[in-house]
Amino acid sequence: MRCVKCLVAAAALVPLAGLLIAWLGLIHVGATGGHWAVTEWFLHWTMRSSVRTAALGIEKPAGFENATVLQVAAVHFEGGCAECHGSPGRRRSAEVLAMLPPPPDLKEAVGRWTDEELFVIVRDGLRYTGMPAWPGAGRDGEVWAMVAFLKQLPEMSAARYQTLALDGDAGSISAFSPCLSCHRSGADGGDQAIPAIAGQSEFYLAETLRAYLSGKRESGFMEVAASNLSDPEVAAAARHFANLPAQVSATATPSSVRDERALSLVQTGDPVKKIAACDACHDGRNARYPLLGGQPLSFLREQLLLFRSDRRAGSATEQLMSRAVRNLTDGDIDRLAAHYASGPMAGTLRR
Ligand code: HEC
Ligand code: HEC
Ligand code: HEC
């Protein structure tokens, strides 16, 4: 009996002793000198095991390596990752190399992980290391685009990296040319996922940028790209792009087939399924609502899926859109995306 009491007392003392050691300040939290080899081994073993287990539940989308968003991922990598991990275009600062643990050169590290494991690391980040989680919650497609880019990184020449990540819109000299590194007019391989922003209404552009800045509209790419804009710069960017002539995305694919279902949804909606006519609001009907004609196919499709599952926020009127598309089927979404991607309709008011 007495022995059981001793055991309980001893068990209670262990955490108390731990607290006492921490309170006395005997645990070294400085980043100088690194970890002991055994601590280092234990931490990495724990990290690898945790990532491996989390990756078991991940299913990779077929053909994600062929993502056409490589350029966006490259620009994002240069702006959001290269500071810590370095890139073919950038060396790391001495401060970053003094982090504990130091962020590895990904050209070498990428090969150690499976695609699913890379996805988990980029989406969730690594606790206690400084490696951040993806800022756009629920945007798995963006994370897969980044994984596709990471897989090419070990073999990527400096020249190719330069073209993808750094050249941007060479002809532009405005204060907003960094925006054109991604929102460029279809250079290098024709990107499918980046919306044209020129010619959208000033109201919509400003509201949208604010929604990214507050994290209300989730997109890791855009939240990072907009994060340095001050309030006056948001207003100036909205004015700047609203005053440029609207452009049809360079990848707009004029369709020769007339899709009757898409056309009737656009013009009259589907009263039985309570789907409002898209034309009641879009493409000139209300100058504050976004123009759709000529936007890239995969962008339109993705946004409709996000709206339908209530995962796309934006301006104060965003709920109009969620209501309008709630009852669209997957097939309707594909048809509508294809319809609008095929370019502005003849006679459509472009502002
Ligand atoms: C603030 C610095 C920082 C930023 C920014 C950052 N990382 Fe990391 N990253 C780290 C650190 C630190 C580690 C962990 C190293 C360790 O555990 O040894 C890490 C680990 C990783 C790993 C695992 C590599 C390995 O084998 O340990 C990958 C993959 C990775 N980062 C990708 C990215 C990507 C992609 C981005 C940009 C979206 C990014 N990181 C942004 C600091 C950063
Ligand atoms: C790293 C690439 C990248 C950069 C740099 C970038 N963008 Fe974007 N932008 C995107 C992507 C990808 C989307 C689609 C995001 C989504 O799904 O919400 C987008 C969406 C937008 C939208 C919403 C368009 C719509 O029709 O809903 C606006 C507005 C915008 N960007 C403005 C800007 C401005 C202004 C800048 C410069 C400060 C900028 N972007 C820089 C990649 C980028
Ligand atoms: C009642 C008005 C209304 C109706 C009807 C409507 N929309 Fe919208 N739509 C909006 C508004 C408002 C937004 C902008 C939401 C925001 O602030 O982010 C939007 C945004 C969108 C976007 C995102 C565009 C971008 O650049 O980010 C797509 C795609 C879209 N609508 C497609 C459709 C389709 C297809 C239909 C018909 C089935 C439709 N909409 C019907 C009001 C409407």
Image: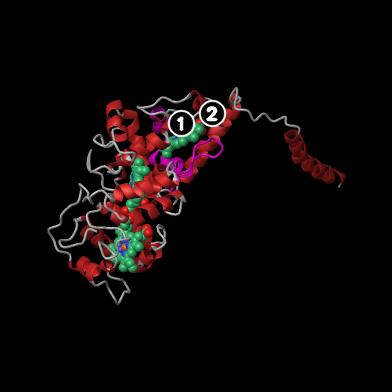
Residues marked 1 and 2 touching at CB (< 8 Å)? yes
Q: Which residues, given as a range, are shown in magenta?
A: 107-136
- At x 38%, y 26%, the residue is 90
- Dot label at residue 103: none
Compute the Cα span from label 1 to label 2: 9 Å
Quadrant the C terminus occupies: bottom left
Q: Earlier in the sequence, mark 1 or mark 2?
A: 1
- At x 39%, y 42%, the residue is 225
Q: Quadrant of residue 64?
A: top left
Mark 2 CB in 8 Å range of ligand 1? Answer: yes
- At x 15%, y 54%, the residue is 254
Task: Please tell me which residue lies in front, 332 or 351.
Answer: 351
Mark 1 CB in 8 Å range of ligand 1? Answer: yes
Instruction: Dividing the image into four quarters, tell me where ligand 3 lies.
Output: bottom left
Residue 246 position within the rendered picture, expressed as x and y whole percent measured from the top left: 23, 51
| Location of mark 1 (residue) | 84
In reply to whether residue 41 is colored magenta, the answer given is: no
Give the secondary structure at mark 2: loop
